[in-house]
Amino acid sequence: MIEIIDIHCHLTFKEYDADREQVIEEAKKILKGVVTSGVEPEDAKRALELMEMHEGFVFVTLGLHPIHVAGKTDQEIEEYEEFISENKRKIVGIGEIGLDYHWIRDPLKIKRTKEVFVEFLGLAKELDLPVVLHLRGTGSEAIEEGLKIVLDEDVRKAVFHCFTGKPQLAEQICEEEYYISLPASIVRSKSMKKVAKRIPISLLLTETDAPYLSPDESEERNVPQHVKEVYEEIARQRQIGVPVAEEEIERNFERLFEVEL
């Protein structure tokens, strides 16, 4: 029996509209749990509905993806934060939140994104929930800046989702006892493989970011069960058995999100 976990995907996205329930039922055959991330207010409501339909299997984090920040007024963000607070017992974390220098280039929008990022970190601390960080850009600038911000804001529990930085930066993050999550696209990344090998296994997590980042580039849509590729790669890089990786990562998941599977 394979017992694996996808700590970050987007089961509410339109890519699953035609066969969402089938995808989830297929995932249940080999996964022990999956965390779907609500990235803006409407998506958040859909994520909670999905969790209620699949209680004990689908878990939820709620946040405001940086690409949605500019389109929201202060009042809309405040109302969304209130919605998250009201539903805090139904969620396991705040996220994804962070910085995105790939899609956001305008200096004023970047400034606004940072302000809202810090605001949501404050919400996570207030609700005593871990943070799922989205830090994307060319090179490692967004990751380095995000690390500095979470340290400055005294955030205790965070996971650097879909980590694409260099192994040295991963080690620096782990020194602060933050977690790193590697996606199924690890099969195509020398850098991710080095990270899987070098950082403490006690701070390692696994994800797909589905429907994105499929391990097979010819596949248009990723699915949660592809997370098994991450476990296999971690086991290969560390020269351990896949069941050992499964046990360690389940323990990490339960520790970070305070969930018992």
Image: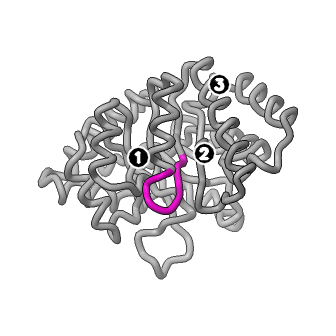
Q: Amino acid at mark 2?
A: Ser
The reply to whether the magenta stretch includes residue 139 is: yes
Q: Amino acid at mark 3?
A: Leu
Q: Name the N-terminal-most of marks 3 and 1.
A: 1
Q: Few, some or many C-alpha atoms within 10 Å of disc 2 (few <14, some 14-19, many ≥20)? A: many
Point 38% across, 34% down: residue: 178
Q: Position of residue 34 (x, y in %)?
A: 50, 46
Disc 1 is placed on an element classified as strand
Residue that carries the numbered disc 1 in the rendered image? 5
Quarter occupied by the C terminus:
top left
Q: Are marks 3 and 1 in contact (CB under 8 Å)?
A: no
Tag in front: 2 or 1 = 2
Q: Is residue 246 left or right of residue 19?
A: left
Q: Which residues are magenta?
A: 134-141
Q: Is residue 123 positioned above or below 204 on the image? A: above
Residue that carries the numbered disc 3 in the rendered image? 123
